[in-house]
Each structure stands twice: as C-alpha cells, then as structure tokens.
Image: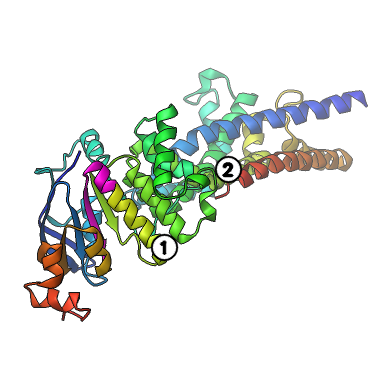
Amino acid sequence: MLTVAGDIVGITLLSLLVCATSTLIATLIAVPVGVALGLREVGSQRLLRNILFTLYGLPPVLAGLLVFLLLSRSGPLGGLSLLYTPLGMVIAQVVVVTPIILGITMSVVATVERRVKETAFVLGADRWQLSVTVVRRGLAGIVTAVMVGFGRAISEVGAVFIVGGHIEGQTQVLTTTIITDISQADYGHAVSLGVILLVIAAIVYSFLYRLQERTMP
Amino acid sequence: MTMFLELEGLRKDFDGRRVLQGVDLRVEPGEVFALVGPSGVGKTTLLRCVDFLLRPDGGRVRFDGREAPRAPSERLALRRRIGMVPQNPLLFRGSLFYNVSFGLCVRGVEGSELEDRTLAALTAVGLRDLAQAKASGLSAGEAQRVAFARAMVVNPELLLLDECTANLDPANVALLEAAIVGYHRQTGATVLVVTHNLFQAKRVAHRAGFLFGGHIVETADVEAFFTNPTDARTRAFVRGEMPY
C-alpha cells in the first residue's frame, strides 16, 4: 500500500515538474517572440504567422517523434543522452507548447487597440517602452495563453510517452500511467491518477484565473 | 523652448483619394495657430502627418527649418519635443496619476520631480483631487482634461490639439481653453489647434488658416480672418455657410 502511495506521489511530482518546467521555458521563449511579431505589420509576417498557426495543431505524437529522432543515439543530439529522461520529456513538451503560447500572444498583441500603441508613441515612448505598454494592456490575454499552454502540457500523452519511454520510477507521468493502467485493466489506479490530474488542473487554473482577473482591462 | 513648423506641398492619399493635395503652411514660433475647416477635409490627417503617425505621400514637414531626422534616436528626441491631444483620447488602465506621469516616466523623470510635475499638471486642469482615481471612471470632459494634462506635463515645444473640446459641455470647454491659454503663456510654446469651432479659434488663436479641398485656402491674423477674409470660400465658411 505504502509503495503504491509512494509511486503515485513520485509520478505526480514528476508530472508537475515536467509540466511546470516546460510551460515556464515555453513562456520565456514564446512571450517575447509573440510580442515582437504581434507588434509588426501583418503583411510582412504573413508567412511566419501561417507557419505558427499550423504548428498550433501539431500532433503531439509527431512532435514526440521529431524530438525522439533528434535525441536518439544516431540523431544530431544523441550524444547528450537525453532520450528516456525527464529533461527529454521537457524538451518534447516545449516543442508542443511553445507554438500555442506564441500564437495566442501574437494575436493578443496584434489586436490590442491601435490607439494604445499610438497613444504611447505620441507620448514619447521608444520601441521598448511601447512594447511594455502594449504587453501591459494585453496582459490578461497573455495569461490566457500561458493557461492554455499549461493545459496542453498537463494533458499531453503522446510526446512524453515516445520521448520518456514510460520507464518505471524514472519517466512515468500521470497521463502515460493512466494509459498503461487501462491497458492492464487496472481501472482503480487509473481513476485515482485521473482525479489527481483534475485536482492539479483545478489548483493551477484557479491561481491563473485570479492572475487573469487582476490583469483584466 | 519653442519650435516653428513648415509644411511644403504636403500630400496624403487614402485608398486612392487625395485628402491633402499639397498643403503649404508655416506656423511661427510661439504662436497659437487655429486650423479650421469643415469635417472631413483632412485636418486630423495633417496633424497625424506632423506627429509621425502617418507617413506623407509627398511634400515636406520641417521643424525649426529642418526635416525630421532618419536616425531613430534623433527622431525620438524630436518626437519628444512635440505633444498631441486627440479628439477621442485613450486613457491607459490605471490612475490619473499614472496616465499623466506616463510621458515623464518614458523620459526618465522620477522621484519628487515626477510627482510634483504630475500633480501640477493635474491641478492645471482641475483634477488634482482625483489623482489616484481610476481613469476608467471618468466622464468624457474629465478624460479630455487628463489627455491635455498628459500632453502638456512634458512641456512640448509644439503642441498639437485635434478638436480636443469637441462634444464637451461649455464648462469643460472653458476649462480646457483656459488651460491651453495658460500653458501657452507660461511656456511660449507653439500651438496648432485644429477645430471646426470658429468661436474657439477666435478665443484662443493669434492666426487662423482655412483648410479646404486639400489645400490651405487662406491664412491671416485671427481678427482679419474672421472679419475680412479675402477668399470667397473662407468668407462663406466663417459666415456659417457651406463653402462649395
């Protein structure tokens, strides 16, 4: 019994670590790039936007396969020995989550009223100050982007399964364990993990929702 | 601290329609110049070209005899010598203090100087007591007064006012006009007022010009402009008739 409980704690902590780290890294990459792209004129960035919006729908298994090929022994990053490690799983999730946060951030910034940008410009803001003003105005939307990104990370199965390998005691996370539990007809364990997943999501989203409320225009 | 403004052959098109067809205008240093004309003749477009919000399709805009520099840092320095109040100002989320201090903050002013200048600007428009109030709860008149305070707090050498009292009640109009005149007296700045309120042009300006058909039809001292205009179209406009 204690072993099972210990397993669940370990799996839950690893899930949280992988999701939080990948969401944080994706946010650090996606928000500045999304703001920069959102501030540009539409025409000049149309191709890039189309590519990004396509990546919105990137199937996680495909992302997992790409990262697997990169990290496998014969791949370009094979020497780093990251395959079947939590760090490899983080990389896979960053690949899945970054386009989502980036795309939403870009849309939020691009749709912040033109008058906000003009007002800051007229009041003497330089390029950086203008960006800060626009981000401040669109902060609630950017928090939403992070919420959606975290939601994708916590519910993701395919990429972490392929890159992590679901190795007992090393790379098991909640979602992949639920899948294997079901395949082994261990429905009680699967339901327990499902409840934990829901509770985590509820706690994280209630925090992000409060943050979003505070940043509403 | 004043600047003179010259427009030479200024052109601007929108969707193939030429709004400004070669505007020539000189606004002398330290004067209050009222640009009048019916709605839709391009008065706002002209101001937006002067304040770098629109790129002219032709002609020249000169500040103190020189065209705007191309280098971003020099252009920013020039932009920071110009202030503008639009017809429908947008106030940022936050307090009145935050809104009015914005221009000072981006110029690196901080501490007691920031506070003193911000509160002085709010006092000038009669909103000192609402310094910490949220900007979102203001009436249209109060919002317009905040926008004026926000523009003048940085002591612009050239102040552009775009129908900034349109749609306001007489009390707010009087308050803003007093603030405009007060700012001009205190700083000697050049002020370009765009308005279709002829009474306002008479009250605040030294000279006036009539923009019509994409050109400046006539400019004159404000007294002569309203009592003895030389062009038939200006005469019709100042009489309240359509100048067609």
Q: Quadrant of residue B11?
A: bottom left
Residue A143 is labelled as 2
Q: Quadrant of the N terminus of chain A?
A: top right
Label 1 packing within 10 angstroms: few (<14), some (14-19), many (20+): few
Return the residue found at the far right.
A1
Name the one closer to the observer, A125 or B167.
B167
Magenta span of residues: B183-195
Which callout, 2 or 1, points to the residue nearer the camera?
A: 1
Q: Is residue A126 left or right of residue B242?
A: right
Q: Is residue B141 above or below residue A8?
A: below
Dot 2 amino acid type: Val
- Say if residue B99 shows up in the picture: yes
**Image color mode:** rainbow
The mark tally for this picture is 2
| Residue appearing at x 9%, y 44% in the figure | B65
Dot 1 amino acid type: Ala
Q: Position of residue A171 (x, y in %)?
A: 70, 27
Chain of the residue on which disc 1 is drawn: B
| Residue appearing at x 48%, y 49% in the figure | A108
| Residue appearing at x 76%, y 40% in the figure | A197
Residue B171 is labelled as 1
Whether tag 2 and tag 1 are in contact, CB under 8 A, the answer is: no
